[in-house]
């Protein structure tokens, strides 16, 4: 499937960007779905969170997260430089405010790979701009198997993530859409369908006022020409 961009349609209608929030228990697949969405759809920019968590071997600083100290995190938080923040599995995570606000001003879509605590904070601050999706695993046994296959966390960390999964799954009602990730391709297709529908919402497309006005103006001209013929 070829990447999607704003130039795919010949008719360009100005619209306001959206904030797509994808959350799930650890191991349910939100990061994989988010990564695939970024690769396919050039209209999305990833909101790169800051975190005090230790970097995993597969992660790149500044790409997956900005890895910072707890002191630096608290400095950002207390300086109102974070749009949202939360403590997850004993580590701190937050969304830098400046990058997110810049993207919205420019009409670009932002992708947020965050937990339910951060999602609630974003909904409180920018409810009209948020599209929220919660990803569920097909079973708890499968969730455990995925965490074990990842082989990047200690047994103690995996046990903690499984304990926290119950708390996280209980928050599914806080989201507009819920997708069960029993098959990655099907789950990703469902997310794409949600995004496409939300982008077509009338209240997200202020350019429709000018576009429909031009259609009506041209229709009046055509009718005048036909009437004088």
Image: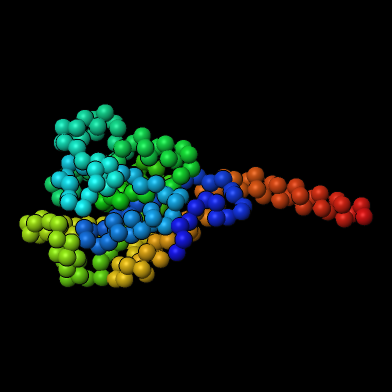
**Which of the pair 76/55 is nearer the observer?**
55
**Which of the pair 39/49 is nearer the observer?**
39
Q: What is the number of callouts on the image? A: 0
Q: Is residue 149 visible?
A: yes
Task: Name which residue lies at 39% across and 43% down.
Answer: 126
Q: Is residue 49 visible?
A: no
In the image, taking residue 135 as reference, residue 151 lies left or right, namely left
Q: Position of residue 113 (x, y in %)?
A: 30, 51
In the image, taking residue 78 as reference, residue 210 lies left or right, namely right
Q: Vertical placement of 61 versus 154: above or below?
A: above
Task: Name which residue lies at 31% across and 71% down.
Answer: 183
Which quadrant of the figure contains the N terminus? bottom left
Residue farthest to the right, as pictured? 229
Q: Position of residue 97 (x, y in %)?
A: 34, 36
Q: Position of residue 175 (x, y in %)?
A: 34, 56
Q: Vertical placement of 118 versus 179: above or below?
A: above
Q: Position of residue 65 (x, y in %)?
A: 25, 44
Which quadrant of the figure contains the C terminus? bottom right
């Amino acid at each position: 499937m070829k990447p999607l961009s704003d130039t795919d349609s010949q008719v360009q209608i100005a619209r306001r960007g959206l904030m797509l929030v994808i959350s799930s228990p650890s191991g349910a697949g939100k990061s994989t779905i988010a990564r695939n969405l970024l690769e396919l759809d050039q209209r999305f920019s990833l909101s790169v969170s800051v975190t005090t968590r230790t970097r995993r071997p597969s992660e790149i600083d500044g790409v997956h997260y900005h890895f910072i100290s707890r002191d630096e995190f608290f400095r950002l938080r207390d300086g109102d430089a974070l749009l949202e923040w939360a403590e997850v599995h004993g580590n701190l995570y937050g969304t830098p405010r400046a990058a997110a606000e810049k993207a919205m001003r420019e009409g670009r879509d932002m992708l947020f790979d965050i937990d339910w605590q951060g999602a609630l904070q974003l909904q409180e601050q920018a409810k009209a701009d948020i599209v929220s999706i919660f990803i569920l695993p097909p079973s708890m046994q499968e969730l455990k198997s995925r965490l074990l296959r990842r082989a990047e966390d200690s047994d103690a960390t995996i046990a903690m993530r499984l304990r926290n999964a119950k708390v996280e799954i209980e928050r599914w009602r806080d989201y507009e859409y819920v997708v069960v990730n029993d098959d990655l391709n099907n789950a990703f297709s469902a997310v794409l369908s949600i995004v496409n529908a939300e982008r077509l919402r009338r209240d997200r497309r202020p350019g429709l006022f000018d576009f429909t006005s031009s259609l009506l103006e041209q229709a009046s001209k055509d009718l005048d020409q036909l009437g004088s013929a």
